[in-house]
């Protein structure tokens, strides 16, 4: 997979691309990630890429020509182009899984007061990481890239990604590691029993309970099995 990131701050990504799983995924050839300086595609002198908005208003707006030239240069057959924007569709695990199936994506990082709206004619969509505004699209681009790369084959253990929070709509069950007891804080006995079937049942119930208690809003989006509905109702009754 290839990910091209268009930004006026490519140096912002250096620590990100040279750390942990992202670094290993690149080294092992699972993904190619390139950061491009938008100013290299400027059509004005001195690499200027911003100007005042038509019709007046505060701040500066990123110009259309540099984006046009960059996308024209980088795009190939099958490439998907996305603008990181607070006006975009909210990014979630399902979107990450969908993007992980692409072969080449380009992420556009806005800045200043935004970008010339003509850019929208050149993209496949806008992506938002939340209902708030940041100074630029660099951090959202990292978040999207990280979420995608960890889903690529062989980047992390397949079973681990399959059991992630939200991978099936539910939050993940609570997890524990050694020691069994520390200053009065203990691990649930069921996890020490060695009875894998009972542990699986406990984890399913704990996952559903965590979702109910922490992210009740997710329940409307999950296509529950009859068994999951029954577990959810039992938990609700017990909590009354």
Image (cartoon, helix red, strand yellow):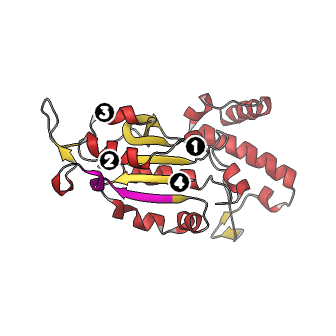
Q: Residue under circle 3?
A: 118
Q: Earlier in the sequence, mark 4 or mark 3?
A: 4
Locate residue 164, reporting x and y percent.
65, 50
Asked if the stretch drawn in magenta spans residue 40, the answer is yes
Q: Earlier in the sequence, mark 1 or mark 3?
A: 1
SS for callout 4? strand
Asked whether the beta carbons under mark 4 and mark 3 sit within 8 Å of each other, the answer is no
Q: Residue under circle 4?
A: 2
Q: Tell me the distance, in whole angstroms, between the alpha carbons under discs 2 and 4.
A: 25 Å
| Above/below status of 1 relative to 97 | below
Asked if the stretch drawn in magenta spans residue 51, the answer is no
Comparing 181 with 126, the one in front is 126
Q: Tell me the distance, in whole angstroms, between the alpha carbons under discs 2 and 1.
A: 21 Å
Locate residue 151, reporting x and y percent.
62, 52
Q: Which residue does the image show at 65% across and 66% down from the upper left?
A: 184
Q: Nearer the viewer, mark 1 or mark 3?
A: 3
Q: Earlier in the sequence, mark 2 or mark 1?
A: 1
> Which corner quadrant of the image does residue 21 belong to?
bottom right
């Amino acid at each position: 997979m290839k990910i091209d990131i268009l930004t006026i701050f490519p140096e912002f990504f250096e620590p990100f691309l040279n750390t942990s799983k992202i670094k290993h995924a690149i080294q092992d050839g699972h993904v190619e990630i390139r950061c491009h300086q938008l100013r290299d595609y400027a059509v004005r002198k001195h690499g200027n890429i911003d100007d005042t908005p038509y019709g007046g208003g505060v701040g500066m707006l990123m110009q259309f020509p540099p984006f046009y030239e960059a996308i024209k240069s980088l795009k190939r057959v099958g490439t998907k182009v996305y603008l990181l924007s607070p006006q975009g569709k909210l990014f979630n695990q399902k979107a990450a899984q969908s993007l992980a199936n692409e072969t080449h994506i380009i992420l556009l990082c806005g800045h200043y007061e935004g970008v010339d709206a003509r850019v929208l004619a050149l993209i496949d969509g806008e992506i938002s990481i939340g209902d708030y505004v940041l100074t630029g699209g660099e951090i959202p681009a990292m978040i999207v890239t990280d979420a995608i790369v960890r889903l690529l084959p062989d980047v992390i253990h397949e079973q681990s990604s399959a059991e992630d929070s939200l991978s099936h709509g539910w939050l993940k069950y609570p997890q524990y590691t050694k020691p069994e007891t520390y200053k009065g804080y203990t691990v649930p006995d069921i996890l020490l029993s060695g009875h894998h079937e009972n542990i699986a049942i406990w984890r399913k119930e704990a996952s559903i309970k965590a979702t109910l208690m922490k992210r009740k809003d997710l329940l409307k989006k999950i296509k529950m099995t009859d068994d999951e509905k029954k577990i959810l109702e039992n938990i609700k009754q017990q909590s009354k």
